[in-house]
Amino acid sequence: MYWQTFSVVPRQSIGPPSVTMFEAGTRMTSPNQTRGNRGRVTSPSAASAKAMPQSHSRGLLDTSVVIGFDFLDLSVLPEEAAVSAITIAELSSGPSAATTQAEQSARQDRLQRVEAGFDALPFDSRAARAFGRIAPVLRAAGRKPRGANLADYLIAATALAHDLPLYTLDHDDIAPLTELIEIVAV
């Protein structure tokens, strides 16, 4: 079950009042929501960028989108979404990095809900080969394909391996990759 449709379901929050989580298993759209232009991030040479349709039924959610899900306009997300195993890894490290018990509980809750709602797309040999295509593009843009943004690049490689648009809040970090994948700035 890599693909999940979902909706925002208000619930009692843990921690700050603005923290709520999503509940997996139902359609994401409501009658008041519309799907329009997805707000693609394009490179300076947009003509060389991969041509993509204006709307998507499927897409890969970056960790930033999963973390910020409660604050996002759902109409910009795909109807069916997947997450990468790299996102699960990032979320798994979150509870131990929390500075308060409430924050730790909220992060653990988010991790458990994502794990329950998605079978993550693996970072497998196909994604590893896709990363091999991403690294030279990053180097050409003056970026290092390692370090602080490595997880973002591995998630982008997963999107490339599965030919999926990548939905992210960190679009500036991966903007050079628009010649390989569609990056949807959320």
Image: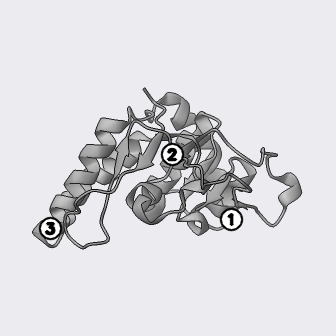
* Placement of the N terminus among the 4 image quadrants: top left
Q: Residue at x 32, y 71 (%)?
A: 18
Q: Position of residue 108 (x, y in %)?
A: 20, 53
Foreground tag (3 vs 2): 2
Report which quarter residue 97 is drawn in.
bottom left
Out of 174 and 38, give the one closest to the viewer: 38
Q: Residue at x 57, y 51 (%)?
A: 77
Does residue 151 appear left or right of residue 31 in this picture? left
Report which quarter residue 94 is drawn in.
bottom left
Pick whichever of labels 1 and 2 is earlier in the sequence.
Answer: 2
User: What's under tag 3, amino acid-wise?
Assistant: Ala
Q: Residue at x 68, y 65 (%)?
A: 141
Out of 21 and 148, give the one closest to the viewer: 21
C-alpha distance separating marks 3 and 2:
28 Å
Q: Position of residue 132 (x, y in %)?
A: 59, 42
User: Circle 3 sits on which residue?
Assistant: 102
Q: Residue at x 14, y 67 (%)?
A: 102
User: What's under tag 1, amino acid-wise?
Assistant: Ala
Out of 119 and 78, give the one closest to the viewer: 78
**In the current view of this chain or complex, which residue is farthest to the left?**
101
User: What's under tag 2, amino acid-wise?
Assistant: Met
